[in-house]
Image (spheres, rainbow, N blue to C red):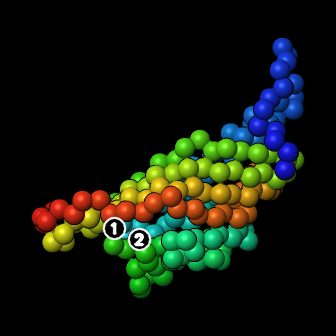
Amino acid sequence: MSDTARLPNASIVRDDQVKWLMDRIEIQDVIARYSLGQDSHQGEDARILEQWDKTFTDDGMVDYSVAGGPVGTYRELARWMRGDGTTPGSMGAFSNWQHMLSLPNVLIDGDRASARTDFYATHRSKAGQAVVTHFNAAGAFVDDLVRTAGGWRIRFRRLELYFADPLQVVSATV
């Protein structure tokens, strides 16, 4: 893909510059919608697909193998994180979490784009446990996106981890 992240110097805004800016804003919104799906549905609320169905293409794929997760569809990722309704997923140990995103580095090439977005995620274990833990992770989402009839969507997302650490363990019942 060509580096179209730089706008040419011009005293008059051109239609292609406006189109590039609008595409970039829509791509940023799609990337943010992923975290909104996670963070809007805390604890036992597993309805992340409300946002993720508008984030990924119908055949959207993910690679979360670096975290022990699936290489498969985004719906498989949702099941791995939130469970299948009878068994909790990997997020089942936590009551609350938040995903904070950097601004993405976006490269647009016609109806295709790539983006890399750093994140920091913090997680808190469920209340009532003898030991309360906080788990933090930092990394990047590396995305391939395509323009669809419904707007920009993630076709493939790969998770990269910089670190994943539990914070201080506090011996107390919350």
Rendered location of residue 36, percent (x, y): 51, 53
Quadrant location, the C terminus: bottom left
Rendered location of residue 69, percent (x, y): 54, 75
Q: Is residue 168 left or right of residue 44?
A: left
Q: Establish if 170 lies above or below 20.
A: below
Badge 1: how crowded within 10 Å, few (<14), some, or many (20+)? some
Label 1 sits on what residue type? Answer: Phe
Label 2 sits on what residue type? Answer: Met
Q: Which mark is residue 57?
A: none
Residue highlighted by disc 2: 91
Residue reaching furthest to the front: 162
- In terms of image quadrants, where is residue 98? bottom left
Is disc 2 placed on a helix, strand or loop?
Answer: helix
Q: Which mark is residue 94?
A: 1
- In terms of image quadrants, where is residue 49? bottom right
Does residue 40 appear in the picture of this structure? no
Badge 2: how crowded within 10 Å, few (<14), some, or many (20+)? some
Choose between 28 and 104: the one closer to the eye: 104
Tag 1 near tag 2, CB within 8 Å? yes
- In terms of image quadrants, where is residue 57? bottom right
Q: Establish if 31 lies above or below 125.
A: above
Residue occupying the point 38% across, 58% down: 136
Q: Is residue 58 left or right of residue 119?
A: right
Rendered location of residue 24, percent (x, y): 72, 40
Residue occupying the point 78% across, 32% down: 6
